[in-house]
Amino acid sequence: MQSWADHADRRLAEAGFRRGGARAAVIGLLDRQSCALSAYEIEDALRAAGRGVARASVYRVLEELVGLGLVSRVEVGQGTARYEAARPDGHHHHHMVCDRCGDVQPFADDELERAVDRLAARVAFDVAEHEIVLHGECADCRR
């Protein structure tokens, strides 16, 4: 099975993008993540790995990847967006955001997916994609 990074590289080449260092670094990092990261977190992780990529380059690459449907932008509120690989197998998860500490926790729920499908069928709407972000307080902040 092809990795998301290989899929992204192929899709970028088809769209006429050359393989640049910043793009390869961001793709490699996102391929290893299980949940969404902010642009700042991506920049920090790359720097910690010895791969300094300018913040402007991180944003440029993310926008290219979002534009090609390779990355999903998750709006978590308070003007913050996070980014994660849009896996070609269609598997995805949703997010719970703590409004106090900013922690983001992924979750998947088959019943929720079925509810989205039932709603789409009931209103005759073809859902291409969906994102559910729940806001509240995490267990640590409730203490």
Image (spheres, rainbow, N blue to C red):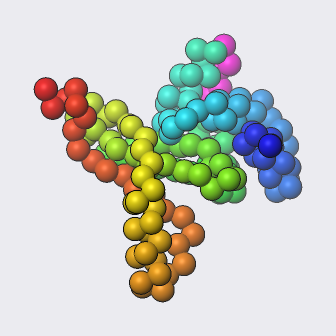
Residue 39 position in % (x across, y down): 52, 35
Residue 94 placement (x, y as % from top left) = 44, 49
Which residue is outermost to the left? 143
Vertical placement of residue 143 versus 31, above or below: above
In the image: residue 111, left or right of residue 47: left
User: Between residues 110 and 69, which one lies in front from this camera angle?
Assistant: 110
The image shows residue 59, relative to residue 75, as above or below, that is: above
Mainly helix, strand or loop, the magenta region? loop
Quadrant holding the N terminus: top right
- Residue at horizontal 53%, vertical 22%? 44
Q: Is residue 28 left or right of residue 44?
A: right
What is the quadrant of residue 129 in the picture?
bottom right
Region in magenta: 50-55
The answer to whether residue 40 is above or below residue 108 is above
Location of residue 33 with respect to 1 vertically, above or below: above
Q: Nearer the viewer, residue 46 or 54?
A: 46
Whether residue 46 appears in magenta in the rendering, the answer is no
Residue 70 position, x and y percent, is 67, 51
Residue at the spot 32% in from the left edge and 42% down from the top edge: 97
Residue at 48% of width from left, 86% of height from top? Answer: 124
> Residue 72 appears at what percent x and percent y?
56, 51
